[in-house]
Amino acid sequence: MSGLQGGQAVAPGPIRLSRLPDDQAAIQPTLLGASVLSNENIRADYWSLVLDAPTIAERAQPGQFVMLTVARQGEAVPILPRPMAIFRWDAAAGTIEIVYRLVGGGTRVLATWDRGEVMTVVGPLGRGFRLKPDTSTILLLGRGIGTCSLTALAEVAIAGGMTVYAVASGRSREGVFGGGFYREAGARHVLEVVDTDGSSDPERLRGDLLDMLDASGVDQVFVCGSQRLLALGVELAARYQAEVQVSLEAHMACGLGYCHGCSTGAPGLAKEAPLVCTEGPVFVSTGRGSLS
Amino acid sequence: MITPRLGVRIGELELSNPVMPASGCFGPELGQLIDLNRLGALVTKSVFYEPRAGNPAPRLTEVGGVMLNSVGIPSAGVEAFIAQTLPRYLAWNPPTIVSIGGLTVDEYHRLAERLAGIQGIAALEVNISCPNLEAGGLEIGADPRTVEAVIRGVVDRSRVPIIAKLTPNVTSIVEIACASEAGGATAISAINTVVGMGVDLAARRTRLGNVTGGISGPAIKPIALRMVWSVARAVAIPVIAIGGIASEEDALEFMVAGATAVQFGSVNFTRPDAMLRAIDGIEAWLGDRGVSDVSEIIGSLELAPSDDELPALNEYGARTDEAHAARRGA
């Protein structure tokens, strides 16, 4: 799953999440017919899609997403566009790159798109990650395709002179993505951990991260793709007085806030819960409790 | 090529063209991507008297070429609607049709009373596809007597056209349409979503947090066409078609079958500019054929090879004429 692609909204569980403050530039999505520049299988079931999307490349912020209409022009299905994190972009070239994983019918159709075809795309959307001005060290915790929400943030942080520690987690070696990207981007230290050898176990990962972080500390922790990584991030943040931001995933239809398909709503609420598309996808942890 | 007239009338309501969004599949947020001033009308999400949450996640899924949703119509309540939501619609030029929902007959009536006289509301669309808490959760729109009572009470409390939005989840949609007309409705809109469900076999779970949900998308178009055709033949008031409409061809098919206007739903997600393209497409289609006014095509469906053989069809399209009945009996 990419940052937002498919899947169920991550149950907020006992960790209390809040909206980020309204201090970022207004989100100004555009509707484009974007030419496919390339669409390739890059490793295992991970694919890279590069689109000619100048207005999106110009406005994108780390953690924002786009809605990709997988149905070709003149075709009616798949009906629902797919929300996808923007893996990275090049404002000068006017291009954006999406990394997706073949997980279902929608992404299987997406993989058939060829160079030169024109795709309906809306973006950039959502509230992205916020780097605080006084932050000097960040920790990125991503699992599977969830890492693809964090990659652009790593680039921006490193370009801003920050120290980046990154964890890329997955079920197996093939399921881990982003380790090479982080190293090339200049991350200080990258841990690639997997379920198959037990290295992704939160107990073990906590020990490895403490060894890594105790000397430097950390100012902000960014998480995507795993409830267990979020819990670990919150625990580490308490130790280092750091802030935690998490990007949630949800099924979406409009991406703009009018359909209410992506509410984080749990049963029994008296009023509508925050929407992942416009009030997220990035939320800030405020400790333990339910989403508010 | 002539430039055809696209304006249509729903009672006193004049629309610059027959294309509008379907309630729930639209919000002023779409104005970030397209020019909403080109639409025939704007239609709000259903407002309820009291604030209410929607259903638990997941609320959306796509299975077998259809979209299933169990959003559950979250509403901030009528006061927040008047103060905050409505002005965002009224910032645009097309008339705003306010969709109203209720869980009891009285809730619809209290809503109509509260909304009466609020500046800028061009019409009310009464969403009767809501569970009736007074009748064990059966849809309000499934019982003709309840429908007539809801509509009559809303009409009595309002000064704007009242559109009854019908559910397809009934035995006879014509019976419900006639009850709406008897209650004083200005127009009918049909259809709402078709109730359905999805199962995730591997997980042995339902695909929606609410177990069941509404089916929408191009797959329901034939269901909607049959129902719009049946209703349009049975009532004297205008019919607004909804159900899998995604293009000018879809819109025109429904108009030929008897609809005066059309609403676009799920396609707004797939193609945010679908309504604008369809308006251009309708104009071009009519122009190419020398049709000077879109009204000329409303109800122009030809049923049989020749008028001499026009069969008597019931609401479901089955033949009811004597000759046919006799043949079957022979």
Image (cartoon, rainbow, N blue to C red):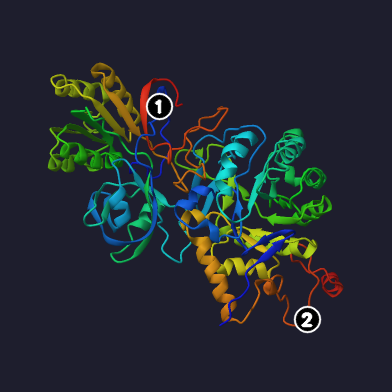
Which mark identifies residue A17? 1
Residue of label 2? B307
Can residue A48 be spotted in the picture?
no
Give how far across and how far down residue A291 sits, in percent: 44, 26
Q: Nearer the viewer, residue A275 or B210?
A: A275
Q: Amino acid at mark 2?
A: Asp
Horizontal and vertical percent position of residue B272: 47, 56
Marks 2 and 1 in Cβ contact (< 8 Å):
no
Q: Nearer the viewer, residue A1 or A215?
A: A215
Observer-nearest residue: A163 or A226? A163
Image location (x, y in percent) of residue B133:
72, 34
Q: Quadrant of the N terminus of chain A?
A: top left
Q: Residues within 10 Å of mark 1 (few under 14, many from 20)?
A: many
Q: Quadrant of residue A159?
A: top left
| Label 1 secondary element | strand
- Residue A271's tag is none
Left or right, A259 with respect to B13, comes to left
Can you say whether A12 is above or below B312 in the image? above
Chain identifier of the residue bearing label 2 in the image: B
